[in-house]
Image (cartoon, grey):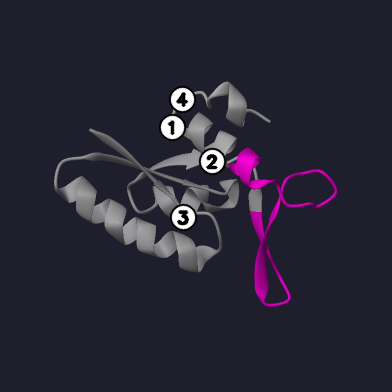
Amino acid sequence: MRILLLAMGSRGDVQPMLALGDRLRREGLAVAVAAGADFGPFVEEQGLDFEPLSFEVMEGSGASSARSGSEGRAPTPDARLVSCARSCGTSPRPSQAT
């Protein structure tokens, strides 16, 4: 079974997924972590597969925000779900496509 752990946020959101992923891997499951592309080396150095999301996490004045590449605006929740579905290797339902 392949498990995809989703971590959308800062390192504080990614770190617990790495601990969970490590435990699941030790139980014999195939585990990947989906997070912003800037976390790729961090995830892979823990021995887990990495799936980049199509938006990046950036920190600003004490709060995390997501950047989609369009003038720093955060992607919509639907766009985030589409990105996650692509990371899982599936296509979103037509009603969810953005």
Quarter-wise, where is residue 28 in the image? top left
Q: SS class of the residue under badge 4?
A: loop
Give the image location of residue 52, x and y in percent. 53, 41
- Determine contact: label 4, label 3, CB under 8 Å: no
Three-letter code for the amino acid on which mark 1 is drawn: Cys
- Image vertical order of residue 47 relative to residue 51, above or below: below
Identify the magenta region: 57-80
Is the residue marked by circle 3 packed among few (<14), some (14-19), or many (20+) residues within 10 Å? some
In the picture, measured across the screen, residue 93 lies left or right of residue 5, that is right
Three-letter code for the amino acid on which mark 2 is drawn: Pro
Q: Mark 2 points at which residue?
A: 52
Q: Mark 4 points at which residue?
A: 90
- Image vertical order of residue 20 relative to residue 86, above or below: below
Residue depicted at 73% across the width and 76% down the height:
61
Three-letter code for the amino acid on which mark 3 is drawn: Phe
The quadrant of the image that shows the C terminus is top right
**Which mark is in front, 2 or 3?**
2
**Which mark is in front, 4 or 2?**
4
Determine if the magenta segment contains residue 82.
no
In the picture, measured across the screen, residue 66 lies left or right of residue 86, that is right
Q: Which disc is residue 42 wearing?
A: 3
